[in-house]
């Protein structure tokens, strides 16, 4: 029996995608082999990666003057690759500190140059998004960076900062494809796949083409956006099966009406769950209401023992992956695109029953 998996990542995938992959596992479209076995230079795989890119461009309305890359190393490698490629004129960048992954990104960027943290929410355990203004981003710098959705702490930017004309670099790992974004607002977008795109192993990078010219020839070719773009993400063997699954997910999203349709569903799922938390005498949300994430809902009971008891009770009823991150505790329900409304309702029913018995 399949469970409702609220894990933050690797996360649940659409059942239709899993069944399609199962059907193709031994013999992809009469090729006589699995996608996992075929050459990345074969016509079959070249068609797969081309369609995967085309569908992502359609889903996000990616302009022609942006390149789409399918890389490896997760978003964590992008913490290094972004400054390696972009922080090369002023050797300086502006960062907003809103959680653990933003902190990791800052630590890696400091190895390449000066990092100016223009604002932080660490004073209140990253439970809010700090107020930003254009003046914070004035001065010589190569780019500005944000983590748009904070997976661990359950917050998100509801509006993008005015960066005074600097390219905006954004980690969209835990919210990409969940709501519409204007790609032209960004210089560089990166996202690990294992939340809303597919299985772990592939990382999506969307970069404005003029920024590719910033990549130094002294960089390792594997770490150069310019080299990766010139080689169509196939300078070396890409994560072929992960790209294939991502392509199935993109096709599934298009069939369901695209990102706008998913955003409506995601807003409904989040409203249902937050309403239950806000109306509860036992459960309490941890993020400031105006900055709450659509994707990662964090909540507590105020007692570690009660939290553990609830997590155990939920698991017994087929609701798994709701334990909060080890650094903060409590509960976290990640309600990515593949989580159906029925799953969120099941979690709410479990919460109601547990509270009634408490």
Image: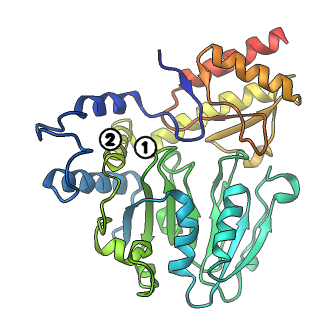
Image height check: is 217 above or below 105? below
Q: Nearer the viewer, residue 270 or 172?
A: 172
Does residue 246 appear to the left or right of 170 in the view shown?
left
- Classify 10 Å Cα crowding around label 1: few (below 14), some (14-19), many (20 and above): many
Image height check: is 5 above or below 190? above
- Residues marked 2 and 1 touching at CB (< 8 Å): yes
User: What is the secondary structure assignment of the residue under circle 1?
Assistant: loop
* Residue 258 image offset from top left, x and y in percent: 40, 43
Judging by the rendered image, the residue that carries numbered circle 2 is 248
Q: Is residue 182 visible?
A: yes
- Classify 10 Å Cα crowding around label 2: few (below 14), some (14-19), many (20 and above): many
* Residue 40 image offset from top left, x and y in percent: 23, 56
Residue at image position (64%, 14%) is 316
Q: Earlier in the sequence, mark 2 or mark 1?
A: 1
* Residue 140 image offset from top left, x and y in percent: 67, 89
Q: Residue 51, which numbered label? A: none
Q: Is residue 279 visible?
A: no
Q: Give the quarter of the image for residue 198.
A: top left
Judging by the rendered image, the residue that carries numbered circle 1 is 198
Does residue 240 appear to the left or right of 202 in the view shown?
left
Residue at image position (85%, 23%) is 282
Residue at image position (25%, 57%) is 50
Image height check: is 40 above or below 108? above
Residue at image position (66%, 27%) is 272
């Amino acid at each position: 029996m399949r469970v409702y998996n609220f894990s933050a990542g690797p996360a649940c995938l659409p059942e239709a995608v899993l069944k399609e992959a199962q059907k193709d596992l031994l013999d992809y479209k009469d090729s006589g082999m699995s996608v996992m076995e075929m050459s990345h230079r074969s016509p079959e795989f070249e068609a797969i990666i081309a369609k995967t890119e085309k569908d992502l461009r359609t889903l996000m309305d990616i302009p022609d003057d942006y390149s789409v890359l399918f890389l490896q190393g997760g978003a964590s490698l992008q913490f290094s690759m972004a400054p390696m490629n972009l922080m090369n004129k002023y050797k300086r960048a502006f960062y907003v500190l809103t959680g653990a992954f933003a902190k990791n990104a800052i630590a890696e960027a400091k190895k390449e140059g000066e990092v100016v943290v223009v604002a932080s929410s660490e004073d209140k355990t990253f439970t809010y998004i700090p107020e930003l203004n254009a003046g914070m981003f004035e001065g010589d710098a190569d780019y500005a960076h944000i983590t748009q959705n904070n997976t661990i702490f359950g917050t998100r930017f509801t509006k993008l900062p005015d960066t005074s004309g600097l390219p905006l670099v954004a980690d969209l790992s835990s919210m990409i494809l969940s709501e519409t974004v204007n790609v032209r607002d960004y210089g560089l977008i990166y996202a690990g796949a294992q939340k809303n795109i597919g299985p772990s192993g592939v990382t999506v990078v969307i970069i404005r083409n003029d920024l590719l010219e910033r990549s130094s020839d002294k960089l390792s070719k594997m770490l150069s956006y310019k080299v990766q773009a010139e080689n169509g993400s196939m300078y070396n063997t890409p994560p072929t099966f992960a790209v294939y699954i991502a392509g199935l997910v993109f096709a599934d999203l298009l069939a369901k009406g695209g990102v706008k349709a998913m955003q409506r569903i995601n807003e409904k799922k989040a409203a249902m769950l937050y309403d239950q938390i806000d109306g509860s005498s036992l459960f309490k949300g941890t993020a400031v209401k105006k900055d709450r994430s659509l994707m990662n809902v964090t909540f507590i009971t105020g007692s570690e023992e009660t939290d553990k008891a609830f997590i155990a009770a939920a698991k017994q009823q087929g609701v798994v992956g709701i334990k909060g991150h080890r650094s903060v505790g409590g509960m976290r329900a990640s309600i990515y695109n593949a989580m159906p409304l029925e799953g969120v309702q099941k979690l709410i029913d479990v919460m109601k029953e547990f509270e009634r018995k408490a």
